[in-house]
Image: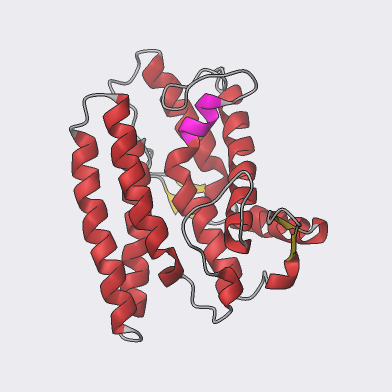
Amino acid sequence: MIQAKLYNTRAILQRAARDHGAKNAVRAESLQRAVDALATRIKAAEHATSLDSLRGIEGDAAVTYWASFNHLLTTDDPAFHIHGRSKRPPLDRTNALLSFLYAVLAHDCRSACESCGLDPQSGFLHQPRPGRASLALDLMEEFRPILADRLAISLINRNQITAHDFTIQESGAVQLKDDSRKKVLQAWQEKKQDTLTHPLLEETITLGLLPHIQARLLARHLRGDLDAYPAYLTK
């Protein structure tokens, strides 16, 4: 799952590097350095021998990714520039949008686990604790880049979400306004209607079905029907 997350994250950076190559050489070069760094982390994750070492590799990759995130944004509005990932609470507009999308994705992954008879509380990457859907958080790792991050980037770059869609509290915490949440949820539902060809099933499915299919494959692995969990890798 962590390898897939890093692979899918790298794919976003690769696409952006290609898109920016002819327009902004400096941006493309910076993105390519991040792509190369993530390739090293992917190989390291393959040989990790403990959860602690795997989490360390994931953490290093996250630093690289979030340091490059501004290069994925084509908007000139500095209100959406970030300085790393912030959460609980998010301290800028982009992080607030990402946190909201991650919460929606986690809900979908929880439903996917439950539909396959899996206990969403019993995770293995995220430590189980009361009230935490740890397995759903495990499952969503590989989907964060391709479902949540891509949508956030599109909403910002297309000016579908602007600085006026957020409120800033006295504490510095940033939140989406209620009407803006509805706008993001509508975009989320539309995004889930996009189609792809699943590499294992070789069938055309919607993005919205992807967590359910992967949860089903995870259940088959845990029950001994599959030797390994076939995580989803985007093209």
Residue 33 seen: yes
Q: Residue furthest bottom?
A: 23
**Residue 55 screen position, x and y as percent:** 34, 34
Left/right placement of residue 141 relative to residue 45 reads: right
Residues shaded magenta? 134-139
Left/right placement of residue 28 relative to residue 96 reads: left
Identify which residue is drawn at 24% across, 46% down: 41
Residue 21 seen: no
**Residue 43 screen position, x and y as percent:** 19, 43
Identify which residue is drawn at 68% across, 72% down: 162
Whether residue 121 appears in magenta in the rendering, the answer is no
**Residue 93 screen position, x and y as percent:** 63, 62
Secondary structure mostly taken by the magenta-highlighted segment of the chain: helix
* Vertical comparison of 209 with 10: above or below: above
Q: Which of 77 and 232 lies nearest the eye of the viewer?
A: 77
Q: Quadrant of residue 2?
A: top left
User: Which image quadrant: the C terminus?
Assistant: bottom left
* Vertical comparison of 55 with 169: above or below: above
Whether residue 138 appears in magenta in the rendering, the answer is yes
Q: Residue furthest right?
A: 179
Q: Quadrant of residue 167?
A: bottom right
**Residue 3 screen position, x and y as percent:** 30, 40
Identify which residue is drawn at 59% across, 79% down: 77
User: Which image quadrant: the N terminus?
Assistant: top left
Left/right placement of residue 204 relative to residue 37 reads: right
Q: Which of 2 and 131 lies nearest the eye of the viewer?
A: 131
Q: Quadrant of residue 218?
A: top left
Q: Could you tell me how many numbered marks the image carries?
A: 0
Q: Which of 100 and 52 lies nearest the eye of the viewer?
A: 52
Colour pattern of the rendering:
secondary structure
Identify which residue is drawn at 55% across, 74% down: 157
